[in-house]
Every structure is written in C-alpha cells, then in structure tokens.
Amino acid sequence: MKITSVLPERVFAYLRSGAPAVLVTVGEDEWGHAVMTWAVALAQAVVRFGVDVDSATQANLERDGKASIQVIGRDNVLVLIKGHARLLRERIEAGPFMGMWELAVTEVKDQTWESVVVSPLLYQWTGPRAETMRQVEEAVLAEMRDWSEER
C-alpha cells in the first residue's frame, strides 16, 4: 500500500471531470459517518466535493474539519484521500441542496491489491425525474470544476 501526500496522476486524471465518491467524516459520537457525494480534483492537492445542507455531514465538517474521500473508479482506481476541509460556498447554484467544500489533501493511500481489479462505484438515476437529476449532477460537477473564489 503506497502512501503519498498528493493525488497520483492517474487518480487526478480520473477525478478531474468529477466522479462519485464516499465521504467519511467524524461524527459527534466520534465514529465514522459515511455518505455518497460527488468529487472533483482541481489539482493534485485539492479535491472539491458536495455536502447536503443542514446534514450531519455538514455539522461534522464544521465541528472537526477532517474528512476522508474513498474513491473507487474505473481502471482500478482505489484510493483513500485524507485532509482538512473548508467551506467554499454555502450553496451550489446548480444544486442548492448542497454546499461546496474543498479538501486540502494531506495523505493519499493507494489501496489497490496485486492480482485484484475493483469495479467502479456506480449508481443510476431512476424514476420520472431521472433525466432532470442527471442534468443537475452534470451542472453541479461543472460548477465545482469551474467556480473560483475571485468571482
């Protein structure tokens, strides 16, 4: 298991356009609290992600600031990214149910095993609003990629 302080190039390339991930925070009870989210890498030491507004996850980040992002992606990408999170925007315009957070990467653990290939973390929108939700997802990822504090 290789540990680095920045995203390896293949992980950065995978997350550059955005991907689903599992976000883990420290709950008030001091146990791990895991939720699905979307993550986007802006640089090899910076990952943006979404957090539901008024959620336990948001409260955990506001209290503690520590987060881990588990990425399970195509081409056998399997990493745990640790770091300190900060709030960038209280609400994402494209998805006002989420706030935009940024993780300053402190540690990346490559969790791949020799002779094992993982399947990507996948989900599928279903029901009558599936196409609308797919469009919201794309817009949220684009906003996380493109938003700048200089605006």
Image (spheres, grey):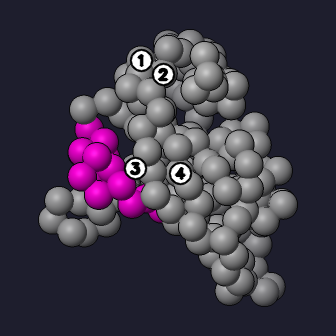
Regarding mark 3 in the picture, which secondary structure is present there? strand
Name above or below for residue 98 compared with residue 78: above
> CB atoms at circles 4 and 3 under 8 Å apart?
no
* In the displayed structure image, the side of residue 66 where residue 129 appears, left or right: right
Give how far apart the Cα atoms at labels 4 and 3 are: 16 Å
Give how far apart the Cα atoms at labels 3 and 1 are: 18 Å
> CB atoms at circles 3 and 2 under 8 Å apart?
no
Q: What residue type is labelled 4?
A: Leu
Where are the magenta residues, as a range?
Answer: 55-68
Q: Which amino acid does label 2 sit on?
A: Ile
> CB atoms at circles 1 and 2 under 8 Å apart?
yes
Magenta region, main secondary structure: helix
Regarding mark 2 in the picture, which secondary structure is present there? loop
Which residue does the numbered mark 2 point to in the structure image? 92
Q: Residue 35's mark? A: 3
Camera-side residue: 45 or 37?
45
Name above or below for residue 30 compared with residue 94: below
| Mark nearer the viewer, 4 or 3 | 4
Sequence order check, earlier mark of 1 and 4: 1
Q: What residue type is labelled 1?
A: Pro
Q: Residue 15's mark? A: none
Give how far apart the Cα atoms at labels 3 and 2 are: 18 Å
* Quarter of the image where the C terminus is located: top right
Q: Residue 96's mark? A: 1
